[in-house]
Amino acid sequence: MKLGCFQSNRGLREMGYADFVAQATQLGYGAFDVPPNNDAAVEIVRAQGGAIHATSAMVPPNLSRDEITQAEIVDAVKTTIDWAADRKIGVITHLIGRDMAVSVDENIALFKRVYTPIATHAESRNVKLAFENWPRNNTMLAMTPELWDAMFTAVPSPALGLCYDPSHFYWQGIDWMQPMWDFRDRTYHAHAKDTELIA
């Protein structure tokens, strides 16, 4: 296992990517989440001897009842799967927003419709999608263990899993340890950061 990093905030993203990788390497990081669909970033990391386990977050359009938007999501995610597979990157970290005009159950039905063909394609290319549990003001789909259960029941493909970030659970007041055990077979990537609650 290697400790990795990515340009996770505005300050880091103001650095040129090559400078970011060089500085992180000097600090002892041996792996990087590269931006999706970015050949230059892949070349920079590998030229400096870094490993790539995953992309940083892919963010397609939110789930939608609109069939055109659904097709756009399928095409965008399949394209990124192919890009990752061709570059031997095995995990795509992933964020997917809900259609806020409909219920959670209806969003799960939309997820099943959209992600069933995506999961089949990911399996065929040996790439995994790892959904991060960032809530984004309660507008994301994969933000609680209950929703993970619903997602993985709707689309049981092993190509779909988690980018586990306990910090989000911590500040939401959700048990952050038990899900690590409950979903250990679905956890394909992890994020870690310092988290503090200030009353």
Image: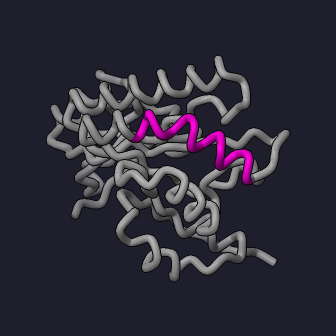
Residue at image point 40% right, 31% down: 36
Front residue of this view, candidates 34 and 28: 34
Q: Is the magenta stretch mostly helix, strand or loop?
A: helix
Q: How many marks?
A: 0
The x, y position of residue 111, in whole percent, is 60, 43
Q: Can residue 22 be seen in this view?
A: no
Residue 106 placement, left or right of 59: right
Q: Does residue 77 appear left or right of residue 91 in this picture?
A: right
Is residue 70 rendered magenta in the image?
no
Residue found at x 57% / y 37%: 113
The residue depicted at 38 percent of the width and 72 percent of the height is 184
Q: In which quarter of the view is residue 52 placed?
A: top left
Q: Is 116 colored magenta in this rendering?
A: yes
Q: Point out residue 122 in the picture as x, y percentages from the top left corner.
A: 34, 38
Could you tell me which residue is drawn at 66 percent across and 35 percent down? 63
Can residue 191 be seen?
yes
Front one among 128 and 158: 158
Q: What is the span of residues highlighted in magenta in the rendered image?
A: 105-119
Q: Determine which quarter of the picture holds residue 149.
A: bottom right
